[in-house]
Image (tube, rainbow, N blue to C red):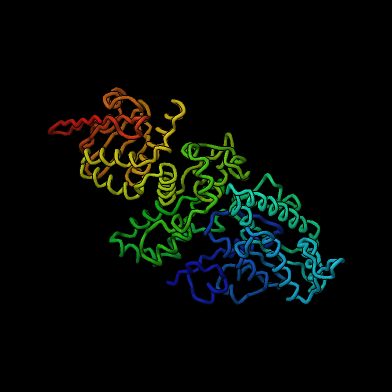
């Protein structure tokens, strides 16, 4: 099978014999409408959708032979199409967005033989992109007898590149781009009689700038049941379209096909784009996995957007509280471009997704979609927040090896050394509340890092919430940490609250680890462990 890695052209995929997941029945339904907006994470197929719509409205029947739409469409009317791709051009340069708009407009003027709107003072083509575009739409309609189709891909790129950079020039340019887009989009309302179809795609829906107020408000289909699987790969599509790829991957991994399907599900599935909660797999990671016959974090490591890194650097303490909670829709749908509440950006960028719906209150449970995102996100947070000289992934590998061997002295050394490498400037010095926040967030990240590769953090038990339980094939480890306390106090809490009771019938040896974290030194000061199985009981104590 040929996998279209990095190919966003519908024509190239169809003519090149690449594997294609047929969504054209949904494209046909979509094309019957008028003005749409669709938000999806990066590398989820938005550009391919725009390319498919372009081919459809251009009447390219040959490209759709054998697809679902071929049995639905009978007319194949050819419409004039104007496409904008805001990934192109230098929209973060002065007048870059305006110049790009004018370039696309000038190309369309040349294609249809239409004279541009002139500036009456200079008698040269006007630099007013909105005015010129309005004239273009009207003239194309008059000349061809067909209303115009306008496709705008990644409309928010000229904004996201400039969000929260801390540069006054960028802030000024961001404001200018907002106003230009707001004005440009107002043309669509004035030119409504000349438009057949409009589609805007992006990652975010900027709400506070009212950019879409000039439209006959576009139909936002981002969380609509009918179009929740328009992009991405469903489980049925995975098991049918990619059946051969699953077989090849299973052989390469030395597993049976059912095990392989479960691995794919755990690592790449879990996105939900409506209340129906239909599972959607990340298409970029799936295609790369089958092309390379290797399971890696392709989507996450393909590049965390710079705007996400900037938001994370300014709102780290809040991130740990976002997962596993219910929210009303308005809290995560409209992005307000501020660091005080970056939740909408985390959701719309694909780092969180809907996991459940409470119909009583019309609220949504948000959490990491899958292991790829969970592992990548927590690693990113740990590196960004702790800024240790030792990279988190390397540290995780070492500590997992130590846990697999039940080498708790090595585990202690690894915890101590990693924390000791955290810069002194990162540790809060103000008050007890700040120190406790730093302590809790530090160990939240470290425990979540470990649990990404093992089992549980903060597992809810009948007697309370334990800091971390790690399970390996051979052993069970129960962790409890104290700030400026003693390891003995931590162990006492494990025993008093019965954190290990759930494992009394488990044949694996169980270790209890109590540790004290010093707000003064920023690392482990006191460490004590107890171990018991059917044959012996041991204790290891360390005081700094």
Tell me where residue 334 sits by quadrant: top right
* Left/right of residue 398 with respect to residue 91 in the rendered view: left
Tell me where residue 200 sits by quadrant: bottom right
Q: Nearer the viewer, residue 507 or 472?
A: 472
| Image point (76%, 58%), residue name | 188
| Image point (58%, 43%), residue name | 332
* Left/right of residue 78 with respect to residue 274 in the rendered view: right
| Image point (44%, 45%), residue name | 384
Q: Is residue 144 visible?
A: yes
* Left/right of residue 134 with respect to residue 11 in the rendered view: right
269 lies above or below 137: above
Q: Nearer the viewer, residue 151 or 226?
A: 151
| Image point (23%, 35%), residue name | 510
Q: How many marks?
A: 0
282 lies above or below 103: above
4 lies above or below 424: below
**Which quadrant would the N terminus be assigned to in this image?**
bottom left
**Which quadrant would the C terminus be assigned to in this image?**
top left
**Residue 447 % position (x, y):** 35, 39
Q: Nearer the viewer, residue 194 or 379?
A: 379
**Residue 317 % position (x, y):** 48, 37
Q: Is residue 29 visible?
A: no
Q: Residue furthest left?
A: 535
**Residue 344 % position (x, y):** 57, 44
**Residue 87 % position (x, y):** 60, 62
């Amino acid at each position: 099978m040929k996998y279209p890695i990095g190919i966003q052209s519908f024509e190239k995929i169809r003519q090149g014999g690449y594997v294609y997941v047929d969504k054209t029945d949904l494209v046909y339904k979509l094309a019957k409408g008028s003005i749409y907006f669709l938000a999806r994470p990066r590398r989820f197929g938005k550009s391919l959708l725009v390319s498919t719509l372009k081919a459809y409205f251009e009447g390219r029947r040959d490209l759709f032979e054998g697809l679902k739409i071929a049995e639905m469409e009978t007319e194949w009317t050819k419409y004039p199409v104007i496409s904008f791709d805001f990934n192109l051009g230098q929209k973060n340069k002065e007048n870059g967005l305006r110049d790009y708009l004018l370039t696309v407009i000038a190309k369309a003027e040349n294609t249809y033989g239409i004279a541009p709107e002139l500036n009456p003072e200079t008698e040269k083509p006007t630099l007013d992109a909105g005015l010129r575009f309005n004239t273009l739409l009207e003239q194309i309609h008059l000349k061809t007898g067909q209303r115009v189709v306008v496709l705008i891909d990644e409309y928010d790129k000229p904004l996201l590149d400039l969000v929260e950079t801390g540069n006054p020039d960028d802030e000024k340019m961001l404001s200018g781009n907002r106003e230009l887009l707001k004005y440009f989009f107002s043309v669509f309302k004035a030119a409504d009689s000349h438009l057949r179809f409009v589609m805007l795609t992006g990652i975010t829906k900027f709400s506070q700038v009212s950019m879409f107020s000039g439209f006959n408000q576009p139909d936002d289909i981002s969380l609509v049941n009918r179009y929740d699987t328009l992009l991405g790969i469903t489980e049925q599509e995975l098991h049918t379209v990619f059946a051969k790829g699953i077989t090849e991957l299973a052989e390469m991994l030395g597993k049976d096909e059912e095990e392989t399907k479960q691995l794919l599900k755990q690592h790449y599935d879990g996105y939900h784009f409506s209340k129906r909660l239909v599972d959607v797999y990340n298409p970029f990671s799936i295609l790369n996995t089958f092309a390379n016959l290797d399971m890696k974090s392709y989507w996450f490591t393909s590049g965390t957007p710079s705007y996400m890194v900037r938001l994370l650097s300014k709102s780290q303490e809040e991130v740990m509280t976002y997962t596993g909670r219910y929210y009303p829709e308005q809290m995560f749908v409209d992005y307000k471009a501020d660091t005080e509440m970056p939740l909408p950006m985390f959701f719309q960028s694909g780092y969180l997704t809907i996991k459940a719906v409470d119909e009583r209150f019309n609220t949504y449970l948000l959490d990491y979609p899958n292991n790829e995102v969970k592992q990548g996100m927590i690693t990113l947070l740990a590196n960004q927040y702790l800024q240790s000289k030792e990279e988190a992934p390397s540290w995780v590998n070492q500590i997992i090896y130590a846990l697999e061997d039940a080498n708790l002295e090595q585990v202690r050394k690894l915890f101590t050394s990693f924390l000791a490498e955290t810069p002194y400037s990162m540790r809060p010095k103000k008050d007890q509340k700040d120190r406790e926040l730093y302590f809790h967030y530090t160990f939240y990240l470290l425990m979540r890092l470990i649990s990404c590769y093992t089992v549980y953090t903060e597992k809810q038990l009948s007697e309370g919430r334990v800091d971390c339980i790690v399970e390996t094939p051979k052993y069970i480890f129960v962790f409890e940490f104290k700030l400026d306390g003693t390891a003995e106090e931590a162990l006492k809490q494990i025993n008093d609250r019965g954190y290990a009771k759930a494992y009394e019938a488990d044949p694996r040896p169980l270790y209890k680890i109590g540790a004290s974290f010093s707000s003064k030194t920023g690392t482990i000061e006191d460490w004590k462990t107890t171990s018991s199985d059917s044959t012996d009981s041991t204790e290891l104590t360390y005081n700094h």
